[in-house]
Image: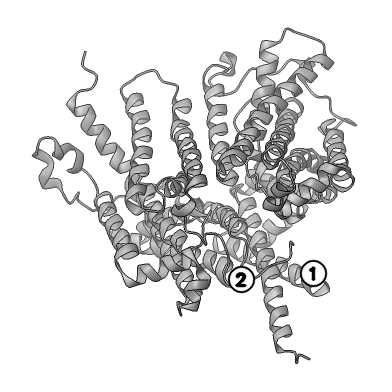
Amino acid sequence: MIARAAAVISCLALGLAAFATVIAIGGGDSIAVLRTLATGGASSVYGLTETVVKAIPVLLCALAAALPGRLGLVNIGGEGQLLLGAIGATFAIRVSPPMSAMPTLLVMALGAALAGAGWGLLPGTLRGLTRANETVISLLLNYVAGLILLHLIHGPWKDPASLGWPQTAALPESARLPGLWGTRIHPLLWFALASCVLLAILDRYAVVGMASRIIGANAAVARYIGLKVPLYYAIAFGLAGALAALGGFGELSGIQGRLRDGMSLGYGYAGFFVAWLFRNRFEWLPLGAFLFSFVITGADSLQAFSGMPFATVYLLQGLVFLAILGSTAGAKIIERRIVAASPSE
Amino acid sequence: MRVLDEALIASVAAGTLRAATPVIYAGLGAVISERSGVINLGLEGLMLTGACAAVGAQLAFGHWVTSLLIAALAAGIVGLAHAFFCVTLRASQVVTGLAFFFLCQGLTAVFGVSLVGRPVTLDVRPPLAALQSVPGLGPVLGEQDVMVLAAFLATAVVSALLFRTRWGILLRACGESATSAAAAGVPVRRIRLLAGLGCGMFCGLGGAHLSLFYAQQWQENMVAGRGWIALVMVIFGMWFPGRILLGAYLFGGLATMQLNLQARGVAVPQYLLATLPFAVTLVLLVLASWRLKRRSGWMPADLGNPFPPEIQGKD
């Protein structure tokens, strides 16, 4: 166990070193880049609150990846589900009559959740019914969601007063989530944390948690003992879509204030990464989301101040993925060698 | 009013061939790897690597053959690295593929910063320019660049390699049952590693066609989902190179139709139309999966499994 942890940590360091090397070769100041990525959100009180702000959608998307992940499925569609949430919420407010703040926000959240659940149900049900690969479907749907968003903001939902900018009109004050403590942190933080706690409890103590674990370990066995596996797949993906979509609602209503391009700073992919890193354990996801949100905040300011592309985040994600895959596999191979070399009875 | 005149048909056909070409190369790469038993979800990243390397090389050396070689080499190295993780280290193929998808997106974005907004010029004539005056065939094939035409050749070569040579039988044996192949003395791991290299090189060529011949410049994330579409076309084509060609042309046709309508000033919702290739690809994937559910014999039976297949703890 200690050897495994040591291997993971040393390979993490190796991944970071590789990252710094790539940045340096690419013509960047790797030390400054690393420092900004590590402390991007921590240099000031404002930066710290911004890190929490970005941790909200990351956490919701991490839940969206972890929920199907418990069943042994891969949901890489958090990005598209989040965008659908923003679209669904915008649609809800466009069709509903003017109301006071509370009902407006509830209607928007409902619109977001329904749109996201529908988007998530697609890969979930198709996987259950036809064994079509849910990873590929959810990923392809990310591209579709992005194009639908572009269509809406360039076309039917475009705000004529925006001087040609592709975006919708600003949301009315009643449709804006209030900030907490005078910051941009919005109340969905509580919702995300509560979902985390609830899912962790269900996973550990409820029958569905047990059933999910069996399906995740071996779907064939689960079928033999009478579990309706496709139903679990569909529900998990539907819930996942709704959770990620609420992240999109938060970005729309709490942060951006209107539908526009760039609603998501790769939150869906970050969520998938966090869920994988913490092995789909719900109780660890808030920590993971907060830590990774530092990196996103850092990359965001890097893009703004030093012209580094935001995709450096993906570079880091990929390298850490590989470092951990490599170290886990490497530790296993070394263990096997030691076992093979030791004298047997 | 005749909407479907001859010139339009010819221009759609020519555009279809052009747009399908990157998907064909990537699909050929994917089929080599998957027939050996390794599924690579990082095709998109491999294509990006090729596209970025090709433009970089073209700007540096100015010779298109060199650029293609460098693109194939760069993506080949990444493909080999993917195979190293999946085959030698026995890591999960799904996660490794996604890791390389992320990695290459970031890598090409960082290295591509200095290439953005620098169009490339190619000193290559269309090889069939002599055909241009031939009615019917001329407008379709005459203007095509060398890589579009080479795609046919490449498909035939890969098909022959896989199904007509000793080497192909060994490779397919690794994909059908690595254990049996190993028992018969086939070097499973070495073949899978080589297949990963081949997969990367073909994907690199596909990306290079996109950046050098199609867009004639580098843009961040310019592959825009074609790698994932190629992945689906391999399933749709039931792991036969010839049928993958068919799926790729379907994609090419849809992509071209959209551009043609736009160019003719037809008022179509541009972005909505752009979802069409993805929507059709999704339908194809579902149909193919539906068919495979009943007749799974088409799929390489050992696809996605590490070798040797030890029972591992869930961790």
Residue topped by disc 1: A5
Asked if one can make out residue B183 in the rendered structure from this viewpoint, the answer is yes
Residue topped by disc 2: B89
Q: Position of residue B177 (x, y in %)?
A: 50, 67
- Asked whether the beta carbons under mark 1 and mark 2 sit within 8 Å of each other, the answer is no
Q: Position of residue B228 (x, y in %)?
A: 49, 46
The quadrant of the rendering that contains the C terminus of chain B is bottom right
Quote the CA–CA distance across marks 1 and 2: 18 Å
Front residue of this view, candidates A219 and A342: A219
The chain letter for the residue carrying disc 1 is A
Residue type at mark 2? Answer: Leu
Instruction: Decide: is A286 above or below B168.
Output: above
Q: Position of residue B18 (x, y in %)?
A: 30, 43
Residue drawn 58% across and 56% down? B103
A213 left or right of A16 in image: right
The disc at residue B80 is: none
Check disc 1 and report its element: helix, strand or loop: helix
Q: Position of residue A114 (x, y in %)?
A: 70, 25
The quadrant of the rendering that contains the N terminus of chain B is top left
A69 left or right of B129 in image: right
Residue drawn 59% across and 31% down? A261
| Rendered image quadrant of residue A345 | bottom right
Residue drawn 19% across and 23% down? B5
Residue drawn 57% across and 70% down? B307
| Rendered image quadrant of residue B167 | bottom left
Residue type at mark 1? Answer: Ala
Q: Nearer the viewer, mark 1 or mark 2?
A: 2
Check disc 2 and report its element: helix, strand or loop: loop
Front residue of this view, candidates B130 and B27: B27
Instruction: Decide: is B94 above or below A155.
Output: below
